[in-house]
């Protein structure tokens, strides 16, 4: 079941990141309350990547704990970004933009790194369980 959830989260991540990278017009839609859909897609992409890593990591492992921390960081990325910007559209000025870029980069690198580590561990466990010497 956990791997099925991971696949679903990976699909959400692919859609979110793909939408943002391709410059999909719907990413500019403004949701009720004034939050642009692109900001939600970015948060969903970060959370989905980290969530995928979490579900692919073995219980009680360091990988699982690291991916849980990464998932928490991804979950607070959007509220923290809004607080730094002081607006829902994430328009920055001055040092706050630099701080946001650093936080966003660190969160994205952590999410991708966590996913890479989880996938590598999964692949190594498949190789180790084959019985081949």
Image: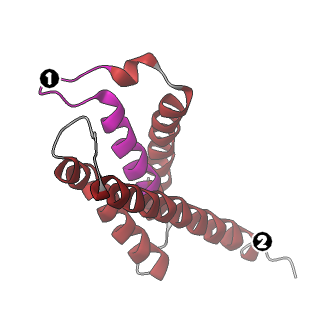
Residue 51, picture quadrant: bottom left
Residue 56 lies left or right of residue 116; in this view the side is left
Which percent across, then down, holds residue 119?
A: 61, 62
- Distance between the alpha carbons at the discs numbered 1 and 2: 52 Å
Main SS of the magenta segment?
helix
Q: Which residue is depicted at the point 38% across and 66% down?
A: 70
x then y, percent, for residue 46: 41, 50
In the picture as drawn, the residue positioned furthest to the front comes out as 94
The residue lying at 44 percent from left, 38 percent from top is 12
Residue that carries the numbered disc 1 in the rendered image: 32
Q: Which element is circle 1 on? A: loop
Near-viewer residue (133 or 84): 84
Q: Which residue is mark 2?
A: 130
Residue 61 numbered tag: none
Image coordinates of residue 84 in percent, x first then y, are: 21, 54
- Residue 94 higher or lower than 20, as above or below: below
Residue 108 among magenta residues: no
**Can residue 59 be seen from the camera position used here?**
no
Identify which residue is drawn at 47% across, 42% down. Answer: 13
């Amino acid at each position: 079941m956990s791997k099925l959830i991971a696949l679903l989260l990976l699909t959400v991540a692919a859609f979110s990141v793909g939408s943002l990278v391709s410059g999909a017009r719907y990413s500019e839609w403004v949701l009720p309350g004034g939050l642009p859909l692109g900001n939600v897609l970015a948060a969903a992409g970060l959370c989905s990547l980290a969530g995928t890593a979490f579900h692919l990591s073995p219980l009680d492992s360091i990988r699982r704990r690291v991916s849980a921390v990464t998932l928490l960081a991804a979950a607070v990325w959007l509220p923290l970004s809004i607080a730094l910007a002081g607006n829902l559209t994430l328009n920055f000025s001055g040092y706050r933009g630099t701080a946001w870029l650093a936080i966003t980069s660190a969160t994205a690198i952590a999410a991708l790194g966590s996913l890479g580590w989880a996938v590598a561990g999964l692949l190594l466990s498949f190789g180790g369980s084959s019985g081949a010497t």
